[in-house]
Image (tube, rainbow, N blue to C red):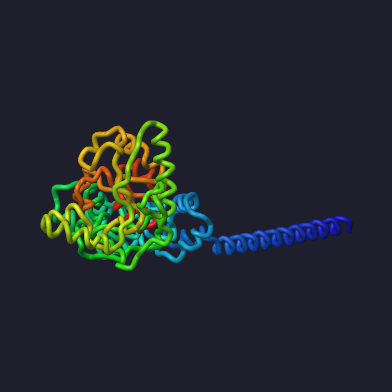
Amino acid sequence: MRKKKRKLKVKKIIAALLIITILILLCLFAYNKYEQDKYRQTTEYKLIEKGYSEDDYKTLKNNLSEEELNKLLNFEYDTKILNLIRIKDFKFDNLERYLNYNETDDLEEVVYLVNMDIDKLDIPYSNKIMSLTKEQFFIKDNLERYINYSNNNSEISTTEVIKDVNSNIDYEYYTNIKDTDLSKDNLIITNKYYKLSSTYVPEDLVSLNGTSYLATRETAEHFKEMTDEAKKLGYTFKINSAYRSYATQESLYNRYLSQHGFAWAEKYSARPGHSEHQTGLAIDMVSASTNFDTFENTKEFEWMQDNAHKYGFILRYDNENQYITGYSYEPWHYRYVGVEAATKIHELGITFEEYYAYYVENGQ
């Protein structure tokens, strides 16, 4: 009887253990299923399902944010993606454009060009495009003009191409003329491609150093500061011309035209509406004891070369860039653009045309 009871007890224990084991197994199965179902909802699982390996996923995770990983699910598996994300300037928002830009197999170039929105232009890829876009003063909107100008002037460098096109000399002088943007204040431009209306007169013209010559108030204030400082050092200047009205410039140009002919007038005088003197920002000046012909050889001129930018003035028509400005060398013609712009122009060694195109019109 005791044996039977013991056997029954053992059987009950075994049964209980079996039940517990089954319950544990069921729990483990349920837990594993839960974990599997949970894993199937992860980005990792979904990306691996798309074709990425576990190592690929590690690479993706190391280079992309969680948000970007989720967005990647909208893309089909592509081995190029793994190479693209390793590139320094990769931007996930441009991924689709990178994948669609098949103009070059060099993925670094793809990233570079797409980031610059070159893929949005209807211009076929070429090595010339890469050279042009890497130039310091490259302007995307001018790319087609750069290419056309370069093709027509194969002997010049890409740096020269950028300079010339930004200065508009891929057009004939006095063609493709635009109205001067008066909102630019001290940085308004007038040249053979930009013009002022016949009625334009600066609002705040004042006397230059107590003379009968006029300039805008800010120009006059900085001119006085500059000449006062120069005087302390023994340098003296006299003004030969400043503000001129449209009518005065018209009379002057027509006189040159009748006296010297068209070619001479075009080189030495601006057509009415195209003169910097109408802006009230330009001053013709020489030393007290010289004239236009001899000013370049004076200590005053030398001082201006080194110091004019500190007061906001630039030598507007220099010797080296006559083909850009369209005017002969004028060591006496100074233009007020403000200290910041004048300093940058001085430091970079560029013309106002180049500065205006890149920093003012293009907003760099």
Where in the figure is residue 289, as x and y percent of width and height? Answer: 28, 36
Q: Is residue 286 above or below residue 149?
A: above
Q: In this view, does 245 lie above or below 350?
A: below
In the image: residue 127, left or right of residue 285: left
Where in the figure is residue 117, as x and y percent of width and height? Answer: 34, 60
Where in the figure is residue 260, as x and y percent of width and height? Answer: 11, 55
Q: Which residue: 31% across, 61% down?
A: 245
Q: Which residue: 82% across, 60% down?
A: 8
Q: Which residue: 50% across, 62% down?
A: 70
Residue 28 versus residue 37: which sits nearer the camera?
Answer: 37
Where in the figure is residue 340, as x and y percent of width and height? Answer: 42, 46
Residue 251 versus residue 56: which sits nearer the camera?
Answer: 251
Residue 350 versus residue 212: which sits nearer the camera?
Answer: 212
Residue 364 versus residue 186: which sits nearer the camera?
Answer: 186
Q: Can residue 172 be seen in this view?
A: no
Q: Quadrant of residue 266?
A: bottom left
Q: Quadrant of residue 151?
A: bottom left
Q: In this view, does 300 lie above or below 1?
A: above
The N terminus: image quadrant: bottom right
The C terminus: image quadrant: bottom left
How many discs appear? Answer: 0
Q: Can residue 208 be seen in this view?
A: yes
